[in-house]
Image (cartoon, grey):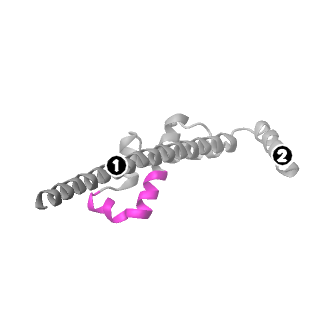
Amino acid sequence: MKQLFLLTVVLLLVSSCVEELIEKPDNLIPEDKMVLIIKEMAIVNAAKATNLSKLRENGVEPTSFIFAKFEIDSAQFVDSDRYYASKPLRYENMYKKVESDLEDQRLKLEAEKKVRDSLSVAEKSKKDIDIKKKDSVLSNVQK
């Protein structure tokens, strides 16, 4: 733990004393927008890993889709990514934000799924009760 703290302090000192490694590009994507783009890319990469055939069926090329959605091009993304990567602490914070946003989204989706599942169970049990009532009415009528 001490070594990690010492390493962090040394990195902070070195990064604060060093001149900029990469100049700020003219077309730099703002940090908050860059976080959204990285988050979308993570989601799309997960979708590609699990269901690439569906994306192909619908004619979706994931990277082009994201660039079009955020009205950027690949060169602008690469320049911005390279610039932010040259600032490790800032870049790390961006990725922590992405991770936090994805976790929040996951929890929200799980909660929605629980609600849908409970509604489905309630609907099924209502149908089962209706069927039992009909069966008991029919058996009483037949007696």
Residue 42, which numbered label?
Answer: none
Magenta region includes residue 57: yes
Magenta region includes residue 120: no
Residue at the spot of label 2: 5
Q: Which of 124 and 56 lies nearest the eye of the viewer?
A: 124
Residue at the extreme front: 143
Discs 2, 1 touching: Cβ within 8 Å: no
Q: Picture coordinates of residue 111 (x, y %)?
A: 46, 45
Q: Residues within 10 Å of mark 1 (few under 14, many from 20)?
A: few
Q: Residue at x 33, y 59 (%)?
A: 55
Q: Picture coordinates of residue 61 (x, y %)?
A: 35, 56
Mark 1: secondary structure:
helix
Q: Main secondary structure of the magenta part?
A: helix
Identify whether 13 is placed above or below 129.
above
**Residue 139 falls in which quadrant of the image?**
bottom left
Residue at the extreme left: 142
Residue range in magenta is 42-59
Type of residue at label 2?
A: Phe
Q: Picture coordinates of residue 28 (x, y %)?
A: 52, 36
Q: State the separation of the CA atoms marked 2 and 1.
A: 53 Å
Type of residue at label 1?
A: Ala
Mark 2: secondary structure:
helix
Residue 4 shows in the view: yes
In which quadrant is the C terminus drawn? bottom left
Q: Residue at x 39, y 48 (%)?
A: 118
- Is 21 placed left or right of 120 in the picture? right
Q: Residue at x 48, y 40 (%)?
A: 36
Residue at the spot of label 1: 122
Q: Which of 133 and 122 lies nearest the eye of the viewer?
A: 133
